[in-house]
Image (tube, rainbow, N blue to C red):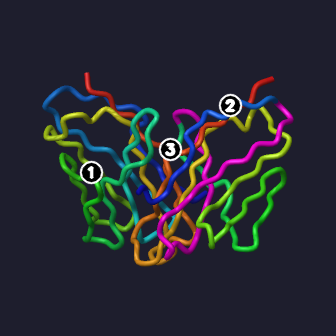
Amino acid sequence: RKEVEQDPGPFNVPEGATVAFNCTYSNSASQSFFWYRQDCRKEPKLLMSVYSSGNEDGRFTAQLNRASQYISLLIRDSKLSDSATYLCVVNTEGYSTLTFGKGTMLLVSP
Amino acid sequence: DGGITQSPKYLFRKEGQNVTLSCEQNLNHDAMYWYRQDPGQGLRLIYYSQIVNDFQKGDIAEGYSVSREKKESFPLTVTSAQKNPTAFYLCASTQFGHLNYGYTFGSGTRLTVV
């Protein structure tokens, strides 16, 4: 079983739509969580950390469900500029490196 | 501004050549990492270093070598033993013991074998 799993997509949505991605993690010792955004042929950039109580940053909302071991990212009012690959990233106790999912591709069309 | 600088942005390698990718950071981070990304694929860990003069192999270290002589620098050499080196190479850093803050990435080097 892969440690961090994401639906690769692509998710094709029109501008203004709401879209949600899920990510599941297998190690219950995972302790901190992130969503990174990666544009085509660019480096990943931190979009937001995911806190236990859930957190929001503008149009983006992240949720954590420890019992079911998944995190989610909700994007409201999608913009063309939101088109990118979204990486789910996990920090697990006892690990020296972060664990990356393979990413979910989002394509927002006019 | 603090950050990570990778150079060159694009690199072309002939068969049988060794090439070195540069990664320099001025964030005062202890830990540095090298990842490889192939088209449509996730990030795969090549090597990482948590302290000067020490480094560990990642999942795909064969055909690669690194050094960590200075805190700021973590160069990656792609040797001729790496049979399929064409990929996007990403360097990242973080403060040791602070993975809960995530990584900062450099802008990457795109290596192509010609």
- Gap between marks 1 and 3, in whole Å? 21 Å
- Residue B60's tag is 1
Q: Secondary structure at mark 1?
A: loop
Q: Nearer the viewer, mark 2 or mark 3?
A: 2
Q: Residue at x 29, y 55 (%)?
A: B59
User: Residue A27 location, x and y as percent?
Assistant: 47, 69
Q: Which residue is mark 3?
A: B107
Q: Image quadrant for the N terminus of chain A?
A: bottom left
- Give left or right: position of A5 versus A20: left
Q: Is residue B66 above or below residue B6?
A: below
Q: What span is colored magenta in the figure?
A: A15-41
Q: B66 or A29: nearer the eye?
A: A29
Q: Amino acid at mark 2?
A: Leu
Q: Is residue A23 magenta?
A: yes
Marks 1 and 3 in Cβ contact (< 8 Å)? no
* Disc nearer the start of the sequence (1/3): 1
- Gap between marks 2 and 3, in whole Å? 22 Å
Q: Residue at x 64, y 61 (%)?
A: A71
Q: Amino acid at mark 3?
A: Ser
Same subunit: marks 2 and 1: no
- Residue B113's tag is none
